[in-house]
Amino acid sequence: MAEVKNRRPLASRQTGWAVRISRWLAGTRITPNQISMIGMVAALIAAVCFWAAGGAGGGLRALLFVAAALFVQLRLLCNLFDGMVAIEAGRASPDGGFWNEFPDRISDMLILMGVALCIGSPALGWAATGFAFLTAYVRELGVNVGVGADFAGPMAKPHRMALVTLATIVSLAEPWWNGTGQVLRMALWVITIGAAFTALRRAWRLVIKLRRSEQDRA
C-alpha cells in the first residue's frame, strides 16, 4: 500500500495500449525487476549513442541521435511497465523498492553524462546529474519522514527525459545552421537549473508539510 500511495501519478497508466502491454508482460516470465534492469541497459545504450555521436558526422551522427532518442524513450517505458506489472498485476517482490529506485539513478547518470560527453562538457553533465539526484533524494526524504513523496516539477524525471529527447530530435537539424551541439548544451543547462529549482521547491514544500503535521498533532 505504501508503494501505491507514493507512486508517481502518470496518465499513461490508464491508456489502452499501456494496459494491454502490461497484461501481456504479466503473462510472461519476465519480472518487474528484470524490466527495471532492461531500462538501465536502454539508458546505457542511449549514453553510448550520445557519446559516439559527438565524434560522428553526417548520416551516422543523425542515426546515432535517432537511436539515442529511441532508447531514452525505451528507458521511460521500462519505468512505466515495471511498476504496472508489479502493482496492477500483483507481481511485486520484497526487493522491488530497490529495483524501482536504483536503476533510475544509474539511468539518469548514464543519459545525462552521455549527452555531456557528446558536447564535450563533462562538468555540466555532472552538475545536471547531481541536481537530478537531489530531486530524487528530497522526494524519498519526504517518504522517510512520513509526509509522502513529492513529484513536483518543473524538472522531474519525465520532464528531464522529455527535454533530452526533444533536444536530440532538434539537434538533427543543426547542420542547417552549422551547429555543433548547441541545442543539447542548452538542454543540459535547462536541466541543471531546473533540477536545482525543483529540489529547492520540493525541500520547501517538505518543510511546510512537516510544520503543518506538527501543528495538527498539537
Image: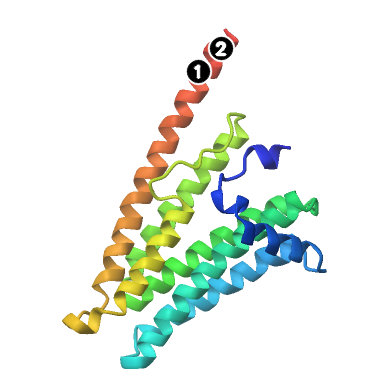
Dot 2 crowding, Cα within 10 Å, few <14, some 14–19, many 20+ = few
Mark drawn on residue 174: none
| Closer-to-camera residue (171/37) | 171
Q: Position of residue 4 (x, y in %)?
A: 68, 41
Question: Which residue corresponds to the image point at 53% horizontal and 41% vertical from the top-left?
Answer: 139
User: Label 2 vs label 1: CA separation?
Assistant: 6 Å
| Closer-to-camera residue (45/162) | 162
Q: Which residue is mark 2?
A: 216
Indicate left or right for 48 with 34 as reference.
left
Question: Which residue corresponds to the image point at 49% horizontal and 62% vertical from the top-left?
Answer: 108
Residue type at mark 1? Arg
Indicate left or right for 186 with 8 as reference.
left
Q: Position of residue 105 (x, y in %)?
A: 54, 58
Query: Which secondary structure, mark 2?
Result: helix
| Closer-to-camera residue (126/172) | 172
User: Which corner quadrant of the image does residue 76 belong to?
Assistant: bottom right
Residue type at mark 2? Asp
Q: With respect to residue 200, does 126 lie above or below?
A: below
Q: With respect to residue 52, does 47 lie above or below?
A: above
Q: Position of residue 42 (x, y in %)?
A: 57, 73
Mark drawn on residue 212: 1
Query: Which secondary structure, mark 1?
Result: helix
Indicate left or right for 161 with 57 as reference.
right
Question: Which residue corresponds to the image point at 60% horizontal and 68% vertical from the top-left?
Answer: 40
Q: With respect to residue 43, does 136 lie above or below?
A: above
Dot 1 crowding, Cα within 10 Å, few <14, some 14–19, many 20+ = few
Instruction: Indicate the quadrant containing the N terminus: top left, top right, bottom left or bottom right.
Output: top right
Residue 120 shows up from this direction: no
Instruction: Indicate the quadrant containing the C terminus: top left, top right, bottom left or bottom right.
Output: top right
Q: With respect to residue 88, does 52 lie above or below?
A: below
Q: Residue furthest top?
A: 218
Q: Position of residue 8 (x, y in %)?
A: 57, 45
